[in-house]
Amino acid sequence: MARILIAGCGYAGSALGHILAGEGHEVWGLCRRPERLPASIRPLGADLTDPATLRSLPSDLEAVFYTTGPDGRGEEAYRAAYVTGLSNLIEALRSQGQQPRRLIFTSSTSVYPQSNGEWVDEDSPVSPEPFGRGLLLAGEHLCREGSFPGVVLRLAGIYGPGRARLIESVRRGEAACPEGPPRYTNRIHRDDCAGALRHLMALERPGGLYIGADHEPADRREVIRWLAGELGAPLPRTGPQEAGRRRAAGSKRCSNARLLASGYRFRHPTYREGYAAIIEERRD
Ligand SMILES: NC(=O)c1ccc[n+]([C@@H]2O[C@H](COP(=O)([O-])OP(=O)(O)OC[C@H]3O[C@@H](n4cnc5c(N)ncnc54)[C@H](OP(=O)(O)O)[C@@H]3O)[C@@H](O)[C@H]2O)c1
């Protein structure tokens, strides 16, 4: 059984840690508020931006996951989460003489600037602009070119229990179907996010980069209409989206072919299985 550290142990990290601990691994979850971790994960209170708090990491770590997310949307928050924190952790591991056989970093499919419905894969062009993309790419570089064998998983939007605001907004009849060309959205259920991370840890010879998205990039309208049907909610209105959402949107289709070829099998292959499971859990 392995000794495993999950740094920045939040929504996805906790799900991952819970699975690994259930398999008998020794799992530590590092974050600033460790009291919120599930009981199966050993709490490790530390601030990744403060090297002094990283001096006594658990010894003999075999695998390290870096699943830290930013506190806000500003450049400093992104730099702290994706670059400073990771660099501090790598330095702390190195100075403690640790040699984990794998470092796995969760990046984001937001590094792809494509916005006209193009299919993208791991070889598609990325952009360092605006700053969020550039800092994610800097984190990817640190992970893959650093001291330990690194693997990057570029995640699509994570949804799952406790993170399904779209369900409520459709139920209340508030979600609008945007006008205009399709806007493709990409997602991954929390359990597949955890499952894919675990899979990458277990692979004998993983590649350095994978996209973590389910099988079906879907037009946002299609998802909203499907949810309305499942929930028996009123047919969603068609109308313009809020300006903020439009700006953040983009439209691309992320291919998970490489992850599938590596042997991962999705528990929730599309939004239908994933949202249906959440709706079912809420009924219970
Ligand atoms: N959520 C998405 O839709 C999405 C999409 C694409 C990629 N990703 C990436 O996937 C990863 C997991 O996402 P998530 O939604 O599970 O993130 P999350 O819930 O925000 O968890 C990240 C955790 O990092 C911890 N953290 C932040 N700053 C820290 C610091 N300075 N020191 C120690 N811990 C710190 C926070 O816990 P404390 O506050 O207790 O420290 C937080 O719970 C992240 O890397 C994220 O960027 C997420």
Image: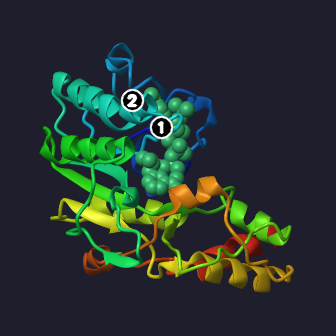
Circle 1: residue type: Pro
Residue 180 image-quadrant placement: bottom right
Disc sitting over residue 25 in the figure: none
Query: Compared to 222, does 189 lie above or below?
Result: above
Local crowd at mark 2 within 10 Å, few (<14), some, or many (≥20)? many
Q: Which label's residue is closer to the chain start, 1 or 2? A: 1
Regarding mark 1 in the picture, which secondary structure is present there? loop
Residue placed at 43% from the left, 40% from the top? 68
Residue 57 image-quadrant placement: top left
Residue placed at 62% from the left, 63% from the top? 160
Q: Is mark 2 within 8 Å of ligand 1?
A: yes
For label 2, the residue is: 80
Residue placed at 35% from the left, 59% from the top? 154
**In the image, residue 117 lies at what x, y percent?**
41, 78
Q: How many marks?
A: 2
Q: CA distance from mark 1 to mark 2?
A: 7 Å
**In the image, residue 33 lies at what x, y percent?**
58, 28
Asked if one can make out residue 16 in the rendered structure from this viewpoint, the answer is no
Regarding mark 2 in the picture, which secondary structure is present there? helix
Circle 2: residue type: Ala
Q: Is mark 1 within 8 Å of ligand 1?
A: yes
For label 1, the residue is: 70
